[in-house]
Image: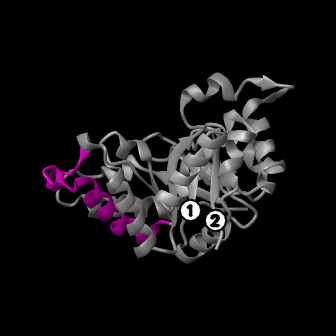
């Protein structure tokens, strides 16, 4: 089953467009796990188990593992998600971007080592940097288009032939790269009007939307602007607000409560 089919299945089976980001920060590890040698895996496993009933996807951020030399824990987390929750989508948030054989090795890292269903990729190096990822049949390539950080304006909003650069990127993804493989886009929840512009360009391609929760993205505006023709189409990611809802023994239960509330908020938006 390819990425698009698996994602559509996950949306419908779970009744959710919520994606739980897995960003295990050692400085914020819950008290019960701080002295555990396997804290990173145990923390992520507990969060996954607590939130799986209300989420369609999980998104481990590779930097939070690599900075702790915890790549082995990331392998374990990915394997656990795929084995225990096979109907959920696994997105590796890596934002890789390079050319030629280097890009191919980044693709192998995501799809062979970690067995991810999809990976985030930096679109701004162009076609030859994206093509190695797209050659992996059935895998999703989620390309940065309009990011959630304020600094994204430095380049993404610059006018090129009368259009913002992010619009040019969206058109290239929809018109060209989507013919080469299973594409999606990354557009921040902090820019709902731009999300609507991107949706109008890319049709029903899936859009990963970070920035809900700690970054302040508005759920209602996100869903209203970004849904596809079926009222779906979004992978709405929340990380810190869910992961660190509590630092005590109840951290997993607290994470479940925030995730469930976010799922319900997403569901509650009327879609035309």
Query: How many numbered tags mark residues here?
Result: 2
Point out the residue furthest to the right here: 161
* The N terminus lies in quadrant: bottom right
Q: Are marks 1 and 2 in contact (CB under 8 Å)?
A: yes
Which numbered dot is residue 3?
A: 2
Residue count near mark 2 (Cα–Cα under 10 Å), binned few <14, some 14–19, many ≥20:
many
Q: Earlier in the sequence, mark 1 or mark 2?
A: 2
Point out the residue furthest to the bottom here: 13
Q: Residue at x 73, y 57 (%)?
A: 181
Q: Is residue 78 left or right of residue 193?
A: left
Find the distance from the CA under tag 1 to the CA under tag 2: 6 Å
In terms of image quadrants, where is residue 17? bottom right
174 is within the stretch colored magenta? no
Q: Mark 1 = which residue?
A: 117
Q: Residue at x 21, y 51 (%)?
A: 30
* The C terminus lies in quadrant: bottom right
Residue count near mark 1 (Cα–Cα under 10 Å), binned few <14, some 14–19, many ≥20:
many
Region rendered in magenta: 28-55
| Residue 16, x across and y down, in percent | 53, 67
| Residue 210, x across and y down, in percent | 53, 46
49 is within the stretch colored magenta? yes
| Residue 167, x across and y down, in percent | 77, 37
In terms of image quadrants, where is residue 194? top right
Point out the residue furthest to the front here: 101
In this view, the residue in front, 129 or 91, is 129
In this view, the residue in front, 188 or 192, is 188
Helix, strand or loop at mark 2: helix
């Amino acid at each position: 089953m390819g990425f698009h089919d698996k994602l559509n299945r996950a949306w419908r089976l779970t009744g959710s467009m919520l994606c739980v980001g897995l960003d295990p920060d050692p400085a914020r590890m819950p008290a019960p796990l701080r002295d555990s040698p396997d804290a990173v895996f145990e923390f992520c496993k507990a969060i996954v188990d607590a939130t799986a009933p209300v989420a369609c996807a999980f998104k481990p951020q590779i930097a939070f593992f690599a900075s702790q030399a915890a790549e082995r824990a990331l392998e374990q987390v990915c394997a656990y998600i795929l084995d225990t929750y096979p109907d959920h989508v696994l997105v590796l948030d890596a934002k890789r971007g390079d050319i030629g054989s280097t890009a191919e090795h980044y693709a192998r890292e995501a799809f062979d080592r970690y067995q991810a269903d999809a990976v985030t990729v930096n679109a701004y190096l162009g076609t030859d940097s994206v093509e190695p990822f797209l050659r992996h049949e059935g895998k999703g390539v989620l390309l940065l288009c309009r990011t959630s950080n304020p600094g994204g304006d430095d380049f993404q909003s610059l006018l090129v032939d009368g259009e913002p650069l992010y619009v040019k990127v969206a058109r290239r993804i929809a018109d060209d790269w989507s013919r080469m493989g299973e594409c999606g886009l990354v557009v921040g929840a902090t820019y709902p009007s731009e999300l609507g512009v991107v949706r109008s360009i890319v049709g029903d391609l899936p859009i990963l939307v970070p920035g809900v929760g700690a970054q302040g993205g508005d759920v209602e505006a996100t869903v209203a602007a970004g849904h596809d023709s079926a009222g779906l189409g979004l992978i709405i990611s929340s990380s810190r607000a869910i992961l660190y809802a509590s630092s005590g023994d109840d951290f997993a239960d607290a994470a479940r409560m925030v995730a469930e509330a976010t799922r319900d908020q997403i569901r509650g938006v009327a879609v035309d």
